[in-house]
Structures are given as structure tokens and as C-alpha cells.
Image (cartoon, rainbow, N blue to C red):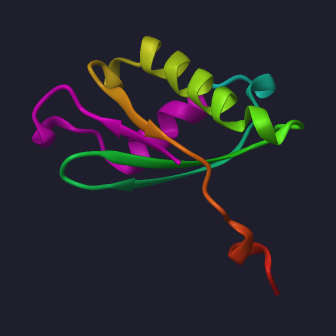
Amino acid sequence: MVSLVPGRAAGDAPSGAVIADVFWALVDADGGLEHIRVSMSDSQADLILFLAVVDPGRVEDVALGLVRRVLAVAPALRGWSVDKCGQVDVGFWLEP
């Protein structure tokens, strides 16, 4: 999960759907993004990124690189920054 914090008033924050759309528009096919979930609160956006990464030890590096590239070029996310990044166990979604 990657948590983003805005650099401006929360009232100006884009919705979770807009943030997801921005990622889909800016991440190329080789970026490894398979799915994204965005959860918004008053103070941050939490992104769960499902990534196609062969080396599990590189998941956080790949996620941070992808998010930083999007933050660098997306006008809708100008001023936003990464607050934290860590892996989330999604195994419970995969169990029958």
C-alpha cells in the first residue's frame, strides 16, 4: 500500500476514482500495474497497487517508482507526496 498526502487543502483533493484514472492514463503497459484500489480520507489517499513483479523483494521499489513517476507529471496530483509505502498481505482475497 502506498499512502499519499496532499500539499493543498483537502477540499481541492481529487476523488479516488480520479486518482485511479490518472494512474491508468499515465502508466504504460510495461509499468507492471494490473489493478489499483484507492481509498480516500480527509488527510490522505491510500493506494493498493496490484503489480506484476517477478521478484517479491522489489515490490516496494517498483511501487514507489511507479507512483513517483505519476506524481511528477500529473497536474491533478500536483503537490501530493508519498507518506509511506509497504506491502499488504492480500492472501485473504485469494482464498476460496
Report x, y in % for residue 41: 26, 55
Report x, y in % for residue 58: 75, 32
Q: Quadrant of residue 75?
A: top left
| In the image, farthest residue toward the front | 57
Q: Quadrant of residue 89?
A: bottom right
| Residue 57 located left or right of residue 39 | right
The residue that appears at 64% across and 25% down in the rendered structure is 27
Label total for image: 0
| Residue 40 located left or right of residue 49 | left
Q: Quadrant of residue 54?
A: top right
In reply to whether residue 11 is colored magenta, the answer given is yes
| In the image, farthest residue toward the top | 73
Report x, y in % for residue 28: 71, 22
Report the quarter where the C terminus lies: bottom right
Instruction: Reply above or below: 47 against 72.
Output: below
The residue that appears at 43% across and 20% down in the rendered structure is 71
The residue that appears at 28% across and 39% down in the rendered structure is 14
Q: Nearer the viewer, residue 80 or 87?
A: 87
Instruction: Reply above or below: 3 against 78.
Output: below
Q: Nearer the viewer, residue 7 or 55?
A: 55
Over which residues does the magenta segment extend?
1-25
Report x, y in % for residue 52: 81, 40
The residue that appears at 60% across and 34% down in the rendered structure is 24
Instruction: Reply above or below: 77 against 56.
Output: above
In reply to whether residue 3 is colored magenta, the answer given is yes
| In the image, farthest residue toward the right | 54
| Residue 65 located left or right of residue 12 | right
